[in-house]
Amino acid sequence: MDLSMLTGPMIGAVIGYGTNWLAIKMLFRPLKPIKIGRFTVPFTPGIIPRRQAKLAVAMGEMVGKHLFTKEDMQQMLLCEEVENEILRNVFGLLNKEDTVKDVCLKCINEERYGEKREELIEWISEKVKNGLIEAEIGEIIAVEGGNIIREKVSGSMLKMFVTDGLINSIVEPLGSQVENYLQEHGNEKIEPVVENQISELEEKSLKDLAEDLGVGSRILESKIREVYRSLILNHMGQLLEKFDIAKIVEEKIRQMDVLDLEKLILQVMKKELGAIVNLGALIGFILGSLNMIL
């Protein structure tokens, strides 16, 4: 066989291989534009570096709107395996000996906790005081006090002297004084009581707290599962809007180093890109062979 007959096909194969290899390299290289004076050399930088910003926007929209949707997240988070794992972790927390205060201090620092504790005591005390005032506790004391006095003097000689007018003249000012006292000193009297109750609550474990509330493990599991499902079904859309997955992906790709981006793409498509290069050699060989025959 005349080796010269292979010259054309081999040259075609080399050209096909070389052009495809160069085309793939030009996806990433050069990394920066090459300038000769004011003139920028065509096809510099490579396609990926030049279009990285638009690629970031396209990838962000694709992930945020098509690959990471509310429905996908709901389906994933409501699958039996994930739901049971959430419940297992919650019950693990409840079964620990950590007190209510311990759990709170894991979420916020001690200074912030102290501030919120004081605010809670003041808020509860204010609510109790206002509740007593709105219930007209002074009038209740006046009416009930008058009834007790009437009951005590009933059937005795004192009834002749202790008339309804006398009783009212005593209990009505007393009722007004009680209401005035509540307005001026209610908080300072109520706050120590509230603080003592909160101190007792702080030292309880979550498990003991649930038992005090009469919540059994089955009821608690049912309620936690119900709250979890409601959160996922009713608030997942709002949650994803706050995260803005599309924007996060866009920023990550935009800030990624081009070399890292190249490495990532080559890791995913190394075989496919290699096949394209080899296919160029094959097509070049075939075209070279046809050229020799024709």
Image: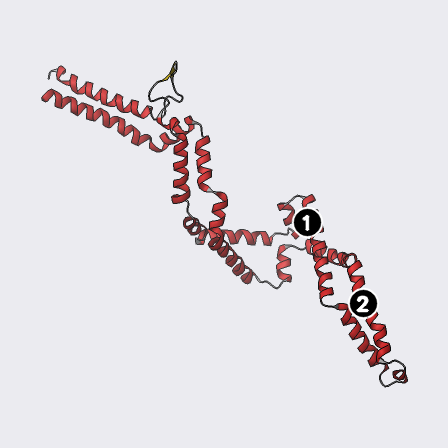
Q: Is residue 56 above or below residue 289?
A: below
Q: Which residue is mark 1?
A: 116
Residue at image coords 47%, 38%? 248
**Amino acid at the residue labelled 1:** Lys
Residue at image coords 29%, 28%? 274
Taking the image as drawn, is residue 99 in sight?
no
Q: Is residue 16 above or below residue 199?
A: above
**Amino acid at the residue labelled 2:** Ser
Residue at image coords 27%, 29%? 276
Q: Give the x, y percent position of residue 178.
A: 80, 65
Q: Residues within 10 Å of mark 2 (few under 14, many from 20)?
A: some
Q: Give the x, y percent position of residue 49.
A: 39, 26
Q: Is residue 80 left or right of residue 108?
A: left
Q: Give the x, y percent position of residue 65.
A: 40, 44
Circle on res. 137: none
> The N terminus lies in which quarter of the figure?
top left
Q: CA distance from mark 1 to mark 2?
A: 34 Å
